[in-house]
Image (cartoon, helix red, strand yellow):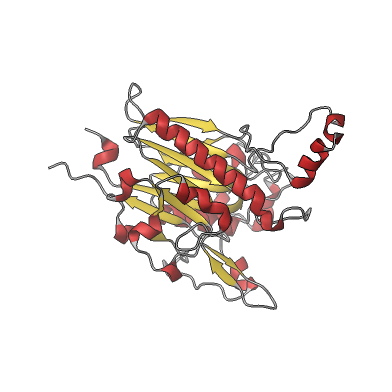
Amino acid sequence: MSYFRTSRIRLVDFNVENLFVFLDRLDPHSTRTLTELPEKEWQKLSSSTIPNKPLAQVKEIARAVLDLDPDILMLCEVGGRESLANFSRIFLNDAYVPHLIEGNSDRGIDLGYLVKRNLPFTFDLISHRHRSIDFLYPHELQSIESGYGHLRSAQKTSHKFSRDVLELRVYEDADQPPVLVSLLVHLKSQLDRSRIDPQGRDRRRAELEKLVQIYNELTTEFGPGTPIVLSGDFNGSAALPKPDPEFTALYDRTPLLDCLEIAGVPQDERFTHMQIYNNRTGTNRQLDYIFVPPELKARVDHENTWVYRFKDEHGMTQIIPRNLNEKRLLPSDHYPVVLTLKPIDIR
């Protein structure tokens, strides 16, 4: 009997905003309770030039995870496998197994999974960080077309993903296809420091189209019996009824739907990120998604699929920030997306 099909399964997508938890200076014989250290002492545990995420925020991230109790947690902006392992071991009672492969981020923020230890599954983790996205910027194409491209020792024919597409295959039987495949992504941001791609749209479109290609390759490989979900930080509005233009391929070339759309979550409750300014009105946007295939649509638990709002130590929901100071108090600048799958009734 399939555990995946007959059990309640909760998936959570969460951009944890620079979750660096380095403890290389920790005395192995120390008896100090790490979670109660003063912030200054917490930062001294790391020798990295990148500071640890503030301890109070790490504890709040953990509080949210423990409150949600996910079976599979899909994470963006993790500071490597060491940080992920330390976070699970110290703040989540070592209840989760970390899965992470370093991606292409120039900031050291990777994609990763935490999977509950007691699940009767085995896993394969596959990185697509080396995949070409079939994209060059216009000035790069012009350079090649004009003949200057040959001056490079290794002529670039395409960029790769800004971070990665991290694929997790979930098996109940090693001799059978996976019962679930997760494709986790953190698409190109809207920053354009070089001023060659306004809001990063062209690069993000190319990454999205390659993600869709990977999805369709897996659909062909495993067939319709294997559900494949897409999740992560899409860095744009990918939801119906008016997705940003760079996400057209998601609806033209796949049957996937946003789990919040399936669950009927009101539009004004779907935002996962707040852009707040000092001198003009801010905006609330949904940047984070879990896209669900038709095979799972009937299993989406409408009552338990939503965007989670952070709670304080007393279990009270924290206010939605109204200014930058209030926003800085949150443990992350993104809210988690929660997908709960109902068991299949086998009677």
The quarter of the rendered structure image containing the N terminus is top left
Q: Specify whether residue 92 is in view.
A: no
Position of 238 compared to 109: left or right? left
**Picture layout, residue 179 above or below residue 203:** above
The quarter of the rendered structure image containing the C terminus is top left
**Picture layout, residue 191 above or below residue 226:** below
**Picture layout, residue 33 above or below residue 121:** below
Q: Residue at x 33, y 36 (%)?
A: 224
Classify residue 177 by image quadrant: top left
127 or 225, nearer to the observer:
225
Q: Residue at x 18, y 45 (%)?
A: 345
Q: How many marks?
A: 0
Q: Residue at x 27, y 37 (%)?
A: 3
Position of 139 compared to 216: left or right? right
Classify residue 228 by image quadrant: top left
Q: Horizontal and vertical percent for residue 219?
A: 41, 35
Q: Horizontal and vertical percent for residue 341?
A: 31, 49
Q: Residue at x 70, y 46 (%)?
A: 107
Q: Horizontal and vertical percent for residue 257?
A: 40, 52
Q: Specify whether residue 249 is in view.
A: yes
Residue farthest to the left, as pictured:
347
337 or 237, nearer to the observer:
237
Position of 338 compared to 148: left or right? left
Position of 207 compared to 230: left or right? right
Q: Horizontal and vertical percent for residue 58?
A: 56, 54
Residue farthest to the top, as pictured:
175
